[in-house]
Amino acid sequence: MSQQPSAAPAPTPTSAVATVAKRRDWWRDAVIYQVYPRSFADSNGDGMGDLEGVRSRLPYLRDLGVDAVWLSPFYASPQADAGYDVADYRAVDPMFGNLLDADALIRDAREAGLRIIVDLVPNHSSDQHEWFKRALREGPGSSLRDRYHFRPGKGADGELPPNDWESIFGGPAWTRVTEPDGTPGEWYLHLFAPEQPDFNWEHPAVGDEFRSVLRFWLDMGVDGFRIDVAHGLVKAAGLPDLGSHDQLKLLGNDVMPFFDQDGVHEIYRQWRLILDEYSGERIFVAEAWTPTVERTANYVRPDELHQAFNFQYLATEWDAEQLREVVDRTLEAMRPVGAPATWVLSNHDVTRHATRFANPPGLGTQIRTAGDREVGLRRARAATLLMLALPGSAYVYQGEELGLPDVVDLADEVRQDPAYFRGAGQDGFRDGCRVPIPWTREGSSYGFGDGGSWLPQPAGWGELSVEAQEGVPGSTLELYRSALGIRRARPELGAGDSVEWLKAPAGVLAFRRGEFVCVTNTTAEPVTTPAYGRVLLASGEVDATAAGETKLPADTTAWFTAV
């Protein structure tokens, strides 16, 4: 018989969700939803999302079935890099609200059974941070300059950068300052935009400040921190030249003198001591781009951080053999340190996976072409069910539950990604995954707010909205709700640290976890597999035959249960 994707289960009562949220080791199998605040919901009609907008949509997130919400930065910032240039780590930027709004959001989330994880940006500050402004005003010899990486330049007149490091956003990683007397002076290090000077973590004041910042937000009631550029805080002694003219191509392939230095781990051991003073199982999540999952595992040893993003998985092509290899390597790497694996398909820095999978393989994680929308969505849905069936914790980026594609045709004049305006760096097309999400079929911004949106939304966005998909059998939203409901109801999903691989045709992944079986067809053709029991859920239409076999369409995942 033919089986369509299951309808969503009834929303779990708030009290039940709250009970689930208090379970021990909640983070080991949690589904964590990333909110990019400026693009989630706008409460005051200024075209920019805000904390009150997020607070108003907490019931939606509760009913979706996630365990926690990770908020991208909302701190006081000039917004040179969408808030990842922080001027004050203890203040909310007025575009997002104020500290009272943050407090109300944290409290309401707790009542809804949701935990709140906030972004922390310790590698660099804004050039408008008071420390950096004073360092410039006070000139060479200022003690404030020791809290950053200020260095004299090379060359007869100091006209050359101190070393050959390149910015991730393109161009040199150094900017020369004009001293208070008007003369060209020292250079400062910025691995990202010039408006983001790197802290010098060898200076004790930097460590003291961030330990204080941790306590400030823990006392506010947050449940954890996502650590931006967690691999970048410590630089190699002497800031040595790298000697390569293709440095950016090396990122993620080797240990760099400015990334993944062993010294970062002592910082996180100190931080863990602070976190463990607080009740409620607060957690750290590392954004650590490392050459291998084995080096990623160093960040989640028992006395350091709790989770680290699995970027190797995110960057894997839609290919059964490659996917199985990265799953096995991830589980094997995490097992010795006792940390859960994490799985993620999209975030605010990469092309949405509905678009990545719509394009031919080998194009990377930032793609400029729409590709085959139908194929991309089909693969994205299948990839989601595969991800949610794996042991460990999963991350969902806002709007992926609607099947949103990247907006690849934004006009140059509306783009705001700083990397877009700098040569030879990142492609700078991150705006495409940051377009505000649609809530309703119609309206000036499809329900995002009453005053338009800070990035233009494409025509037809309303047909992908929450309103258009809610309650519609087979919609991507209802697929997510069903999957998250099943995952929560079945303890073998998410738990553990291994899978039992089953024999499957070429291009097909099949594994067992207790009474549960997940089968994913990554090929462009239907396949016939054994009937592993009752179909719990499928990303596409599945045919169960009288002969005890199952016909799985192209690019489709099905969940089975023997009981």
Image (tube, rainbow, N blue to C red):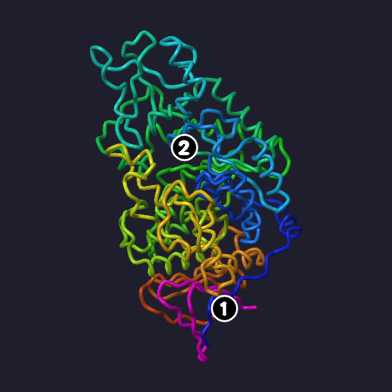
Farthest residue, direction bottom: 546
Q: Is residue 111 left or right of residue 32?
A: right
Residue located at (55% from left, 20% from top): 204
Report the residue marked by disc 2: 231
Query: Spatial distance from mark 2 to mark 1, Cα to Cα?
Result: 42 Å
**Pointer 1 local density, CA inside 10 Å: few below 14, some 14–19, many at least 20:** many
Q: Position of residue 496 (x, y in %)?
A: 61, 59
Name the N-terminal-most of marks 2 and 1. Answer: 2
What range of the chain is rendered magenta? Answer: 534-563
Q: Nearer the viewer, residue 549 or 199?
A: 199
Name the side, left or right, on which 174 lies relative to 379.
left
The residue lying toward the viewer, choosing from 435 and 310, is 435
Q: Residue at x 30, y 22 (%)?
A: 161
Q: What's the amino acid at mark 1?
A: Val
The secondary structure that dominates the magenta segment is strand
Q: Is residue 562 magenta?
A: yes
Identify the mark at residue 397; answer none if there is no mark. Answer: none
Label 1: element kind: strand
User: Quadrant of the image for the C terminus?
Assistant: bottom right
Is 520 magenta? The answer is no
Task: State the image coordinates of residue 404 (x, y, percent, origin top left).
Answer: 45, 60
Residue type beneath disc 2:
His
Identify residue for label 1: 535
